[in-house]
Amino acid sequence: GVEKGKRGQPAPLAVLLQMAHAEAARSQEQVARAKDARNIDAAVNLAASGKRLLALIEEAEKLAS
């Protein structure tokens, strides 16, 4: 959706943002569970993926406004 928005093509950014925010919350929960389980590799990988998702959310929010 973000790539379509960059190219000026219509994309349902509001719906995509809603889904992305929900996924970001789930990702944070998974990071917490991985930390609790002392699975550092998983926690680090999940945190990195979560940061990338948050960056994409920020980019999409700029396009949507």
Image (cartoon, grey):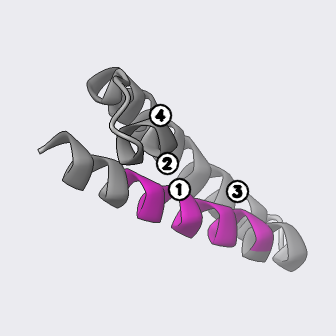
Between the C-alphas of marks 2 and 4, the distance is 16 Å
Q: Is residue 23 magenta?
A: no
Instruction: Measuring from the top left, give residue 45's x and y in whole percent.
Output: 78, 70
Is mark 3 in CB contact (under 8 Å) with mark 4?
Answer: no
Q: Which residues are magenta?
A: 45-57
| Mark 3 residue type | Arg
Q: CA distance from mark 1 to mark 4?
A: 13 Å
Q: Is residue 54 magenta?
A: yes
Mark closer to the chain start, 2 or 3: 2
- Label 2 or label 3, whichever lies nearer to me, is 2
Report the Cα–Cα distance between label 3 and label 4: 30 Å
Disc on res. 24: 2
Which one is earlier in the sequence, the residue at label 3 or at label 4?
Answer: 4
Q: Which residue is mark 3?
A: 33
Q: Secondary structure at mark 2?
A: helix
Sequence order check, earlier mark of 3 and 1: 3
The residue that appears at 75% across and 76% down in the rendered structure is 44
Label 2, label 3: how many angstroms apart (C-alpha)? Answer: 14 Å
Decide: few, some or many residues near mark 1? Use Cα within 10 Å; few <14, some 14-19, many ≥20: some
Q: Is residue 15 left or right of residue 64?
A: right
- Check residue 14 in the rendering and tell me which mark sits there, or answer none: none
Q: Is label 4 in a helix, a strand or a loop?
A: loop
The location of residue 49, given as percent across then percent down, is: 67, 62
Q: Which residue bears the numbered disc 4?
A: 1
> Does the residue at mark 2 contact the one at mark 1 (Cβ under 8 Å)?
yes
